[in-house]
Image (cartoon, rainbow, N blue to C red):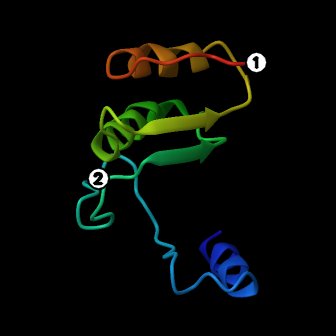
Amino acid sequence: MLELMEANLRLNKLESCIDVKELNWGEPTQSMIPFVPDIILASDCVYLEAAFEPLVITLADLATLDTTIFLSYRKRRKADKRFFNILKKRFDFVEVS
């Protein structure tokens, strides 16, 4: 997906203001992202149960009280509720259908 994202940056002439990097959930983010984002967009990240905790750790590492996180996902199975139980421990959130 990185190559596709880089191609999209070139097509839209955004290489000078956007940088594409791989981010491994659960690993420290400070060296990867040296600023606090105002908004985090995440799509289709809730699918692998083993990744639930690392994803929440990474979101918590990136965000402050002023950060808004938009997370879209597809309801697949009952186990996905576990993700939101983990998320509840660190974040306040509102579900929107």
Q: Residue 27 carries which label?
A: 2
Please give left or right for residue 89 compared with residue 21 in the image: left
Residue 15 occupies which quadrant of the picture?
bottom right
Answer with the quarter of the image where residue 55 lies. Answer: top left
Q: Residues within 10 Å of mark 2 (few under 14, many from 20)?
A: few
Left or right: where does residue 81 sit relative to residue 21? Answer: right
Amino acid, disc 1: Ser
Nearest the viewer among 91 and 87 is: 91
Relative to 83, does residue 32 appear above or below in the rendering?
A: below
Q: Nearer the viewer, mark 1 or mark 2?
A: 1
Task: Name which quarter of the figure residue 97 lies in.
Answer: top right
Task: Write the residue at 73% across / 22% down.
Answer: 75
The image shows residue 95 at horizontal and vertical percentages of 62, 16
Residue type, label 2: Glu
Q: Is there any visible trace of residue 47 in the rendered image? A: no
Q: Residues within 10 Å of mark 1 (few under 14, many from 20)?
A: few
Is residue 44 among what the camera can see? Answer: yes
The residue that appears at 39% across and 49% down in the rendered structure is 25
Give the Cα separation between the discs numbered 1 and 2: 31 Å
Question: In the structure shown, which secondary structural element does the residue marked by tag 2 occupy?
Answer: loop
Residue 48 coordinates in the image, percent (x, y): 57, 36
Q: Which mark is residue 12?
A: none
Residue at (59% x, 20% y) in the render: 80
Q: Which is nearer the N-term, disc 1 or disc 2?
A: 2
Vertically, is 67 above or below 4?
A: above
Whole-percent x and y of residue 64?
30, 38
Residue marked by disc 1: 97
16 or 81: nearer the viewer: 16
Tell me if 83 is positioned left or right of 65 in this view: right
Label 1 sits on a secondary structure element that is loop
